C-alpha cells in the first residue's frame, strides 16, 4: 500500500527527510483517536491491533518515538501494549508524566485537582447535566465526557462555562476535546512536551513528525511549525474524523483514523514510488 501524499510542500519535504535520515528522526503520536479508536468508555480503549507492532518496527530504525497523551502515562502504556517496545517514550498528562524503559516519573498533582474532584459532582448536579454525562478521574486531571448523551455537543456547550468557572477557582485550565472537557493543571501542553523532549535529546533531529486527532494536538502542530522556521523538516498528520476538523485544516497529511495512521507507519520508511 502506498502512503498518502502530503498536500503541502513542507510536509513532503518532511517525509523525504525522515526517509533519507531515519536514524535522526523523531516521531510523535497522540494516543486516543490517533493510535487507538475513540470509544464510548475510555476504560475500554485499546490501541489499534497493529499499532504496537508497527511502532516496534520503526523504533529500531528511527531516532526516537514518543507518545504524548492526556492520559496517565502508565494507562497509555497498558492500553497501547507498549511495555515491550524498546526506545519508546510515553509522556502522559500532556507531558507532566514520563514513562521510559518501564520507569514512571510523575509529580504530585496540585491541590486544585483535589478541590475540583470534590466540587465537580455538585457542579454537574446543579447544572441539570444529563445522567449520561460522566467523569473520568485521571488522577492529575478530571475529564467530563458527554459522548453518551443523546445530544453530546449540546450537553458539552451547556457545561463549558460552568467548568471554566470551576477551573478558574481551583487554579486549573479547561482542555476541550471530542465531546469532553478536561480540567487539568496549567503550564504544559503537547507542544511544550514535544519541544522539551527534543531539547533533552541534545542533538538536532533530522526531521520531526507528529500525528494527532483533537484540539489538544494543535499545540504540537504549532511546535512543528516553529521547528520548520528553525530549519528542521517536519510533518503534521491528522487522524481524520467527522467530529473535529480543525486539525485536518492544519495538517500536511490527513489519513483515515487510527487505521490510516497505522497504515502510514507501515509505509513510512518504504521507498517512494
Image (cartoon, rainbow, N blue to C red):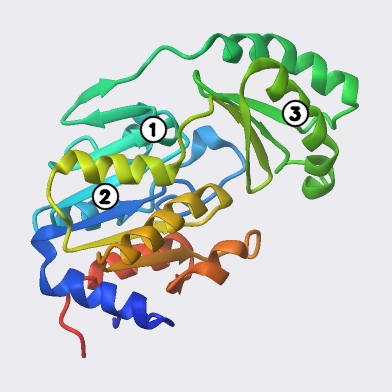
Residue depicted at 48% across the width and 30% down the height = 187
Q: Are marks 1 and 2 in contact (CB under 8 Å)?
A: no
Left or right relative to 217: residue 164: right
| Label 1, label 2: how far apart the Cα atoms are | 17 Å
Secondary structure of the residue carrying numbered label 2: helix
Query: Residue 225: where, in percent of width, then height?
Result: 40, 63
Q: Which residue is mark 1?
A: 92
Residue 217 relative to residue 29: left or right: right
Q: Is residue 112 left or right of residue 14?
A: right
Residue 43 location in percent, x, y?
A: 51, 32
**Residue 24 x/y as whole percent:** 12, 59
Q: Residues within 10 Å of mark 3 (few under 14, many from 20)?
A: many
In the figure, 237 relative to 213: above or below?
Answer: below
- Tag 2 residue: 52
State the CA–CA distance, disc 3 to disc 2.
35 Å
**Are the residues tagged 3 and 2 within 8 Å (C-beta)?**
no
The N terminus is located in which quarter?
A: bottom left
Residue lying at the far bottom of the rendered structure:
273
Answer with mark 1 or mark 3, whichever residue precedes in sequence.
Answer: 1
Which of marks 2 and 1 precedes in the sequence? 2
Numbered circle sitting on residue 140: none
Kindly identify the residue that appears in the image at 23 percent across and 49 percent down: 65
> Is any part of residue 46 visible from this angle?
no
Q: Secondary structure at mark 3?
A: helix
Which residue appears at 61% of the width and 63% of the height?
A: 246
**Snapshot quadrant of residue 222:** bottom left
Which sits in the foreground, 223 or 116? 223
Residue 63 coordinates in the image, percent (x, y): 13, 54
- The circle drawn on residue 163 is 3
Amino acid at each position: 500500500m502506498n502512503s498518502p501524499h502530503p498536500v503541502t510542500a513542507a510536509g513532503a519535504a518532511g517525509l523525504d527527510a525522515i526517509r533519507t535520515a531515519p536514524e535522526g528522526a523523531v516521531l510523535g503520536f497522540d494516543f486516543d483517536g490517533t493510535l487507538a479508536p475513540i470509544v464510548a468508555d475510555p476504560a475500554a480503549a485499546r490501541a489499534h491491533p497493529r499499532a504496537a507492532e508497527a511502532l516496534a518496527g520503526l523504533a529500531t530504525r528511527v531516532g526516537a518515538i514518543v507518545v504524548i497523551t492526556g492520559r496517565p502515562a502508565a494507562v497509555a502504556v497498558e492500553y497501547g501494549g507498549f511495555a515491550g517496545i524498546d526506545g519508546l517514550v510515553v509522556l502522559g498528562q500532556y507531558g507532566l508524566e514520563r514513562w521510559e524503559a518501564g520507569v514512571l516519573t510523575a509529580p504530585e498533582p496540585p491541590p486544585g485537582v483535589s478541590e475540583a474532584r470534590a466540587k465537580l459532582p455538585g457542579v454537574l448536579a446543579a447544572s441539570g447535566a444529563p445522567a449520561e454525562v460522566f467523569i473520568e478521574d485521571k488522577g492529575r486531571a478530571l475529564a467530563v465526557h458527554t459522548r453518551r448523551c443523546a445530544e453530546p455537543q449540546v450537553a458539552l456547550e451547556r457545561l463549558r462555562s460552568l467548568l471554566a468557572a470551576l477551573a478558574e477557582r481551583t487554579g486549573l485550565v479547561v482542555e476541550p476535546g471530542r465531546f469532553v472537557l478536561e480540567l487539568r493543571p496549567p503550564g504544559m501542553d503537547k507542544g511544550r512536551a514535544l519541544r522539551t523532549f527534543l531539547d533533552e535529546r541534545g542533538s538536532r533531529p533530522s526531521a520531526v513528525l507528529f500525528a494527532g486527532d483533537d484540539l489538544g494536538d494543535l499545540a504540537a502542530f504549532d511546535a512543528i511549525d516553529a521547528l520548520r522556521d528553525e530549519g528542521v523538516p517536519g510533518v503534521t498528520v491528522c487522524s481524520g474524523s467527522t467530529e473535529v476538523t480543525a486539525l485536518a485544516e492544519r495538517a500536511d497529511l490527513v489519513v483515515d483514523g487510527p487505521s490510516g495512521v497505522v497504515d502510514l507507519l507501515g509505509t513510512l520508511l518504504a521507498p517512494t514510488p
